[in-house]
Amino acid sequence: MAEQGRFARLMERVKVWRAEYGPTEVAAYLRERCGGEAGQVIEAAGRLMDQTFVFTDPWDMEPCGEPYAFPEMRWDEAPNGDPEWVYMLNRHDSLQKLLQAWRLTGDEAYAGKLKWYLFHWMEHNPLIPGGETVRTIDTGIRCMNWTVFLLFFLDGGLVSEEEAERILAGMGDQFRYLREAYIGKYTLSNWGLLQTTAMCAAYCWFEEYLPGGGLKEWAWKELETQLELQVGDDGSHWEQSIMYHMEVLNSCMKLWAVCRFAGEETPGWLRRTVERMSRYVLFAAGPDHRQLAQADSDVTDVRDVLTKAAVLCGSPELKGGGYKALDLDSCWLLGSWGLRVYENLAEGRPAETSLVCGDTGNIYLRSGWGEDAHYTYLHCGPLGSSHGHGDLTQICLYFEGRPFLVDSGRYSYREDEPLRVKFKEAGAHNVCTIDGASQARAEGSWSYRSYGEAFRNSCREKGPLHFAELAYHGLTEQGRPCLVKRKVAVHDSGFWLIVNDICCEGSHKVEECYHLDGSVRTEREAQAEAGTGEVPRWRLLSGDVRLNLWGQQDFSLEPCWVSPRYNCLEKSGRLTGVRRFEDRFTGWTAFAGDGIQVKSVPVQRAGDSRELGEETVTAVEFLLGERESWIILIWNREICRGTKLLTCRGVPVYGRAVALHVRDGELCERLRL
C-alpha cells in the first residue's frame, strides 16, 4: 500500500506539471513556429530508431558529424577511435530527440525506442569506478536527462509503475555511485557541478524513490559551494573556456526550470549566479551572436542560452541578445509558461558596451549592440583549468560585424593527435612568441610543463576610446626570464593600435602572429611588399568589408588550420611579423577600416626639437578623413632624466597613454587614458 501511495502522489504532481508546462501546447508551437528545427529532430530521431548516432547539437561538448551505426548496441566502443565519442553516447543528450519526435508526431514508437535504450543501458553498464561508460561527469548529465525523460513518460502513460520504479532505482544507484566516487577537486570543476545539479533536479520530483541519508542536502550544499568558488562576481567562470562556462550555466538553468515546475523555491544564490553568468555571455558574444573559440571551446551561437536566461531572469537585456521568439530547445525546457513570459517580455540592451573581468583577465569591448558593430576580445589572465590555452595577451576582433582575427580553437582532446598540443600553445593564438617557442609548454592534452604568470590587467575608457594594458612574466625555452607587455588602444570608429613591449636579456627573435577567420581573403600591394610608401601591409577582406593591417614591420602570410568546432578543421591564413632584438623590443601594429590612413608622428621633449624614439613613446595618427584624425600616444619607457613634458604637433602631452582628437587642424579634445 505504501508503494502504491507513493506512486499515486507522484502522478498527482505530474498532473500539476502538465497543467503548468503544457506538453500539448509546446508540441503545437514547435510544429508551427519551429518547423525547420522540428524537421531536423524527426530526422535525427529516425537515425536513432536504427541505432545510428550523430553528435552535432550546438552544446555537444565533443561533437562528431560522422554517423556511426550499431546494429548490435555497444555502449563502450568508439568507432572513430576517440574516447570522447563514447562519453557523448553515454550522456544520453541525443536520445532526447526520440522524446521530442514522439511529441511532434504522436508516434509512440519513438518513445518506445527511448525506453528500450534506458533499460538496455542499465542492463549492460555496471557502475564500476573507472569505466568508460560511467564517468562521473557523464553520469550526472545522463541522470539530468533521465529526470526529464521520466516526467514525459509518466505524463504520457508510457511506463508502468514497475518500469518507473526500475528507472528510478537505476538513478538512485547512480547517485550513490557518484557520492562514493566524489573527490575534492570536483568542487572546483564543471565535473562536480554537472553531478550535483542532476541530483538536486531529481530530488525535486522523485525524493521518495531516491537514497536518503542526507544525500539531497549534501548535493544542494555542495552546489552552493561550487558556484561560489567557480563563478566570479562579474559572471566569468574560472576554467577559462567559455564552452564549459556554458555547460555550467545550462545545467543551472535546467535545475531552475525543474524547480519551478516542481513548485520548489529556487535558491537566491542559484538565481543570482545564473543572472551573472548570462550577462557575461551577453557581453562575450560577438556581433554575430556567436561565442569565440576561447581555449577548449567551439564557435557557437549563444542566442538559445540567452533566450532561456531571459525567461528565467525576466530580463529585457538578455532578451535583446536572444531570439525574437522561443527556439525549439528553449520552448522544450520552459514549456508554455516560458512562451507566455517571453512573448510579454520587453526587449532591451545594456547601457554599457564593455565588460572587464579582473579575476579571469578577459576584456570585451564593442562599439555598439548592432550586428554590424566592431568588437574586441582581449585576454591575459590565469590558466584556469586544464582546458586553458597559451593565449596570454590574445586579441580577437570583429570589424563591421565580421570576424577577422580569431582564436584557432581546440580540434581534439586525443592524446595521440599532434594538433591537440599545437592548438594549445601560444603559436596558435594572436600573440607574440620569443625564439619560436611558447611561454605555455603543453605536456599532452591536459597539462603544461610551464606557463606564464599574468599580471592583473588595466582598462580605461573615455568617450569612443578604450585602452588596455596586458602583461605577463614567463620563461623562454632556454629558461631565460622574459616580461611581455601588450598595450591596445581601440576606437569605436574602427581602428586598433597594438604596442608590443618585450624584455628578455640577450639576442632573440620575436614573432607576432595573427590568425584570420576562414572567411577572410587577403590582398597585397606592391608598395607594401617593397617597404615603401605609407600604405597598408595587407588588405583583409570579408565579403564586401575591408580591414587593413599597418605597422612598422612587414608580415608574411602562411597557411594554417583553424578549428571552429571539435573534430573540424578549416583552412585559413596566419600573418606573421618577425623581428630580431637585443634585450628589449618595442613595436606597433595597427588595424583600421578601409579609408582610414595610418602613420607615425614625431614626439619631442618640450623645448627640444630632437625626436624621441618610438621605443620611448609610440605615437600613431589615424586619419579618418581629410578633416579629422586621432593621434594615440603610448609611453613605453619611464623618462627618468630631464624634462618629462612632451609635445606632439606642438601640443603638450603627459601620461601613460594620451589621445589627441584633431579636426580641421585644431585640437578639439585631449584624453588621458
Image: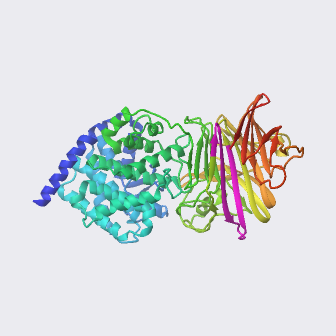
**Residue at 63% over, 45% down:** 460
From this view, report whether residue 51 is shown above or below residue 611. Answer: below
Please state which of residues 142 and 394 is positioned toward the viewer in this rendering: 394
Residue 659 image-quadrant placement = top right
- Locate the N terminus by quadrant: bottom left
Q: Identify the image's colour scheme: rainbow, by chain, secondary structure or one colour.
A: rainbow
The image shows a total of numbered marks equal to 0
- Locate the C terminus by quadrant: top right
Query: Residue 619, how many percent across, how many down?
Result: 78, 44
Q: Say left or right for 644 vs 393.
A: right
Residue 254 among those drawn in magenta: no
Task: Answer whether residue 65 is visible to the viewer in this image.
Answer: no
Q: Residue furthest left?
A: 1
Query: Residue 76, how many percent across, how many down?
Result: 40, 65
**Residue at 71% over, 70% down:** 479
Q: What span is colored magenta in the figure?
A: 460-489
Q: Say left or right for 23 vs 442.
A: left
Residue 461 image-quadrant placement = top right
Query: Residue 31, how many percent across, how many down?
Result: 34, 36
Q: Residue furthest right?
A: 609
Q: Say left or right for 414 vs 186.
A: right
Q: Say left or right for 156 vs 630.
A: left
Query: Residue 582, how many percent across, how many down?
Result: 82, 62
Most prominent secondary structure in the magenta stretch? strand
Please state which of residues 248 and 63 is positioned toward the viewer in this rendering: 248
Task: Answer whether residue 179 is visible to the viewer in this image.
Answer: yes
From this view, report whether residue 396 is shown above or below residue 141. Answer: above
